[in-house]
Image (cartoon, rainbow, N blue to C red):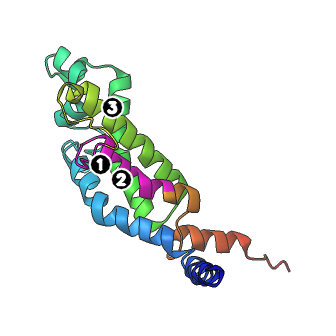
Amino acid sequence: MERLVRLHADIFRRIESGMTDMIPLLARLLFAATLLGYFWASGLTKLGDGVLGFLDPSSGAYAQIFPRAFEAVGYDASQLTVLHRAVVTAGTICEFLLPALILAGLFTRLASLGMIGFVVVQSLTDLYGHGGIGHEGTLGAWFDRMPDSLILDQRALWVFPLLVLVIRGGGALSLDRVLIRQVARPRVTT
């Protein structure tokens, strides 16, 4: 039995050491395959008119991010505060920028941490801003043998690869790796 345990440990130690840089790369690819398009499509619904539409978000952006406040002012964004506008503009920009940084592997840890924050705020808005907390099944429950709740189950699976990236960085084929090599390169002085 001891020999079998050692063989098992040896085999998986070798696999693990060979995958050190691949795990973050796979987490980035998983994020790109499952969530990149989702966030960019959502961001497109928030853009205002013209090239600088991200600086003047659409009314749909206010309806998505501040549904109750937007309804309270009769769906007139001009009646909302500067803070509302700043949050909606920043949220719109982040919905494009953070996934792009993760895809490129640039400032991966910070971008992933930002996306985790984004998902938390998005989840709270879905629950309390849009009233999802009042609908059975939206929040869901862990360990209930039903893996399909919108918030607890789905968003936990969204956050996991992001946590891997916060902890491990961008991994192989990342711009972070290129930058680190540039900074670590000895400088030649003449």
Residue that numbered label 3 is attached to: 124
| Side (left or right) of 87 relative to 110 | left
Residue 12 belongs to the span the image colors magenta: no
Among the two numbered marks 1 and 3 on one chain, the one whose residue lies closer to the N terminus? 3
| Side (left or right) of 177 relative to 60 | right
Q: Look at label 3 and name its amino acid.
A: Leu
User: How far from the left and from the top, in percent, is residue 17?
Assistant: 61, 78
Quadrant of the frame with the N terminus: bottom right
Structural crowding at the residue carrying mark 1, measured as other residues with C-alpha within 10 Å and reported as few (<14), some (14–19) or many (≥20)? some
User: How far from the left and from the top, in percent, is residue 91?
Assistant: 35, 40
Residue that numbered label 2 is attached to: 157
Q: Which residues are magenta?
A: 144-163
Alpha carbon of mark 3 to alpha carbon of mark 2: how far? 16 Å
- The residue that appears at 31% across and 46% down in the rendered structure is 153
Q: Check if mark 1's residue and mark 3's residue have beta carbons within 8 Å.
A: no
Most extreme residue toward the left, as rendered? 74
> In the image, which disc is placed on residue 154?
1
User: How far from the left and from the top, in percent, is residue 180?
Assistant: 65, 69
